[in-house]
Image: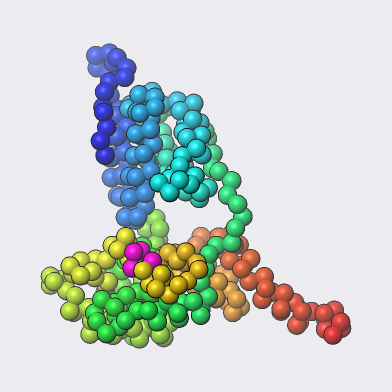
Amino acid sequence: MIFKRHIVKAMSEGDVMNLLIDLLDHFLKYSKALNYSANCLHSYKINVGRFIRWLEDVHEINTVELLQKKHLREWIVHLSEHVTRSGLPLKPTSMNKNIENVRMFIKYLTKQEYLYHDLVDELEYVKEPDLLPSVITHMDFRKLINNVMTDNSIGYRNRAMLEMLYSTGIRAGEMLKLNVSDVDINRATAIINGKGGGQRIVPIGKTALKYLKTYIIAVRPFLIHEKGELALFLNKEGKRMHYERFLNMIRGYARSANLDVNVTPHTFRRSCTTELLKAGANMYHVKELLGHKNLNTLKHYVKLTITDLKKTHEKCHPREKESN
């Protein structure tokens, strides 16, 4: 990122220039020390960086001392008017991601006493339409994995990764952080290091376990370039698989399968959750599997099962039986 770094306010002798770009660097290091994921840190860097560039370009502000409530309100308006490269406005979810990242940055500045007045309340989230999350059906999943050729090491690795995601419902970032030692083949479980340093153990289904076991024993050794590599899933260079490469791989398979749904790594988490709830899984158990703190996060998935709920109601309710 390139910043002008011109001085916009005369500082008296002894004053300290707290450049926002430098404070962003401190914020990223602090967040990394708290074990935030690489994806989260990348999001902070990009979105907060854009916010800082906007402050400098529009208001000629590059120091924290000059930041005011009106600037944050104007930035929200700027987000609402922003047009992407494809000529479309930002989606409410994208706007809220930007707002969330900048809120975290402002909270950090306040906590570290770079700011002495609370500005966070000026960053209100945008109302998002109450849409159902996108998922793929089990038939769609089978259609997608049929496009994964397992006659080579990369293809087999990809199949093992997709089976792992769909079986466990873990986040893609959690899967990519796995080391070989985190997987217990004999017990069919994996230790997952989740958000904020939380840790949980998840079961691995039979099909996913079959591919994972074969990958570890017979495929992964051919991908290793350096002895002592800990990462479970390796790229062609023998290093830990990166999210962007994994994302592009999934998009490629989804295109080949001609799926109507916009498939991302998170789609498998949603789809796993939906299938479990449709089959009558205990919501508390699903919450534990996903690593959520409360049941509220499952409310959208419950909506997806309304068709099945209607069928159950018609089949089981005594008044419905009387009408037959």
Most common secondary structure along the magenta stretch: helix
Compared with 72, 314 (above or below) is below
Residue 159 spot, x, y in % from top left: 34, 78
Horizontally, residue 137 falls left or right of residue 244, namely right
Residue 6 spot, x, y in % from top left: 26, 23
Residue furthest to the right = 322
- 37 or 314, which is in the foreground? 314
The residue located at (27%, 72%) in the rendering is 232
The residue located at (39%, 73%) in the rendering is 256
Can see residue 52?
Answer: yes
User: What's the coloring here?
Assistant: rainbow
- Magenta stretch bounds: 247-251
Residue furthest to the left = 226
- 305 or 282, which is in the foreground? 305
The residue located at (31%, 38%) in the rendering is 24
- 173 or 192, which is in the foreground? 173
The residue located at (33%, 68%) in the rendering is 249
Q: Quadrant of the N terminus?
A: top left
Q: Was residue 68 drawn as part of the magenta stretch in this picture?
A: no
Among the 4 quarters of the image, the one containing residue 209: bottom left
